[in-house]
Image (spheres, helix red, strand yellow):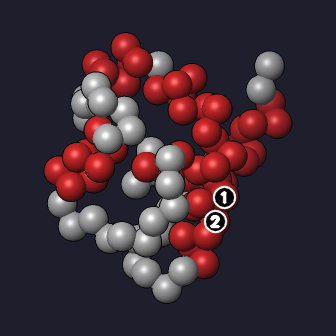
Amino acid sequence: MWFLLHYEYSTREYTKCDETIKKLKKEIEDYSKSEKYLEKKELYKFLEPRLETAIENAKKLNKSKISSKTNVYEFFNKIKKYKI
């Protein structure tokens, strides 16, 4: 869900990982849920330009009444001030 929030706000509650991956592949065509892919793609650098969007979408999601919530954005909010 965190990766999807870089592209859009949604309150959809995914019940299966495959549903999330299918949706994510519409934005990142070669996405693969594997450590090898994450290392190869340097996903942080790839998604960094959309970080503010993801943070805002996550904040909005946490204010909604659905059960799917994320606080990953709090970590990125804290570390972005140390960016070199």
The residue positioned farthest toward the bottom in the image shown: 65
Rendering coords of residue 27 (x, y %): 39, 38
In the picture, measured across the screen, residue 25 lies left or right of residue 70, that is: left
Rendering coords of residue 45 (x, y %): 57, 23
Please rate how many residues cluster around mark 2, counting C-alpha atoms within 10 Å: few if below 14, some from 14 to 19, many from 20. some
Comparing 43 with 75, the one in front is 43
Residue pointed to by mark 2: 59
Please rate how many residues cluster around mark 1, counting C-alpha atoms within 10 Å: few if below 14, some from 14 to 19, many from 20. some
Residue pointed to by mark 1: 56
Tag 1: amino acid: Glu
Query: What whole-number distance in Å separates the C-alpha atoms at marks 2 and 1?
Result: 5 Å
Quadrant (top left/top right/bottom left/bottom right) for the C terminus:
top right
Tag 2: amino acid: Lys
Comparing 35 with 23, the one in front is 23
The residue positioned farthest toward the front in the image shown: 26
**Which residue is depicted at the point 37% across and 24% down?**
38
Q: Are marks 2 and 1 in contact (CB under 8 Å)?
A: yes
Would you place residue 29 above or below residue 20 in this image? above
In the picture, measured across the screen, residue 53 lies left or right of residue 68, that is: right
